[in-house]
Image: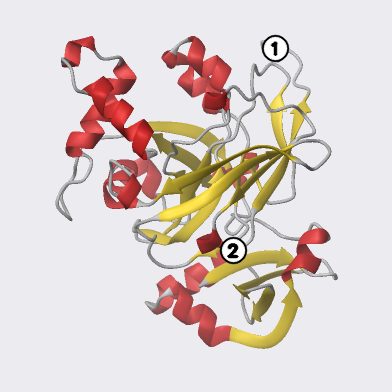
Amino acid sequence: MLLVQFITESQERRIGILHDNTIRVVGGYATTLDLARAAVAAGTGLAQLADSAASSEHVNYDDVAQAGRILLPLDHPDAAHCYVTGTGLTHLGSADTRDAMHKKIGGEVDSLSDSMKMFRMGVEGGKPAPGTPGVQPEWFYKGDGSIVRATGQDIEMPDFALDGGEEPEIAGLYLIGNDGQPYRLGFAIGNEFSDHVTERQNYLYLAHSKLRNCSVGPALLVGELPAHVSGTSRILGKDGQVRWEKAFVSGEQNMSHTIENLEYHHFKYGLFKRPGDVHIHFFGTATLSFADGIQVQPGETFEVESPQFGPALRNRLAVGETGFAKVKAL
């Protein structure tokens, strides 16, 4: 099942079940968060509740999208109660990339870079037996809900950024129950978006490079993530023509960690089990236009598409003015 959030012509929020190009409106619930809270309270599945509440009202997805009324598949009315985080060095990549990576990590540990050491740790210990913690992944913080963009909205990089590049990924979407129990609502395609030039200067700049906008959606895939996810990442020039295009893969078949292990090492912290909070957690990628020497220009568009997730995620790159944040003493 695919769920989408949108705004009606009368500026009211709605949630609906997406099938082909038609959104079947779910009655009684204005948001994914409302639906999820009700499912937790009733002890039922999200898909089951959505299906039982589906009405006879239908709207055309393309019409809503062209009007700019598609929302994020999950959000929180208070952006500070939405954590946006992620893990890296989790994907094996294509066969060629995988072979090259294994050659790099096959030597003495002391001869490897810190990144290669961590990748090797994941290959060796990222897929433990179910219910058993494996090795910790790389982890990073991106921001709160205020930095997340829906399809059709601009992704804005700050004017001090050295680069603005896409990262086509799968994100897990979660709600923390009133008892502190994390509930996974499902998955969505996303563009994790980072400053790769800043990160390349020194890996200790990773934290800086991740404090950027990102985008998720447009649809929430309810249920388990397929073992193999395939998709295409594109850069569209200002003229709308494809400037760069490459296939990407995800899912546990193409990863060095299980989803369960990545989730364990995120939600093991009490900070991330605060009742009522929403989490968007990116699982990593192995496909970047930056790796092919592409530098995306303001006005160009990122497109991330995967058949399992419905319509493509599209965002134009923009630049935002920041100025100098001089602190005043009181």
Which mark is nearer the camera, 2 or 1?
A: 2
Quadrant of the drawing holding the C terminus:
top right
Amino acid on which disc 2 is placed: Gly
At 33% from the left edge and 21% from the top edge, which residue is drawn?
115
Residue 256 x/y as whole percent: 28, 41
- Disc marking residue 310: 2
Q: Which residue is mark 1?
A: 328
Q: Eyeballing the image, is 179 above or below 82? A: below
Bin the neighbour count of mark 1 within 10 Å (Cα to Cα): few under 14, some 14-19, many 20 and up.
few
Residue 6 x/y as whole percent: 71, 65
- Disc marking residue 62: none
Residue 297 picture quarter: top right
Q: Eyeballing the image, is 23 above or below 211? A: below
Q: Residue furthest bottom?
A: 56
Q: Eyeballing the image, is 93 above or below 114? A: below
- Tell me the SS state at disc 2: loop
Residue 72 picture quarter: bottom right
Query: What is the count of numbered marks?
Result: 2
Residue 35 x/y as whole percent: 54, 72
- Tell me the SS state at disc 1: loop
Bin the neighbour count of mark 2 within 10 Å (Cα to Cα): few under 14, some 14-19, many 20 and up.
many
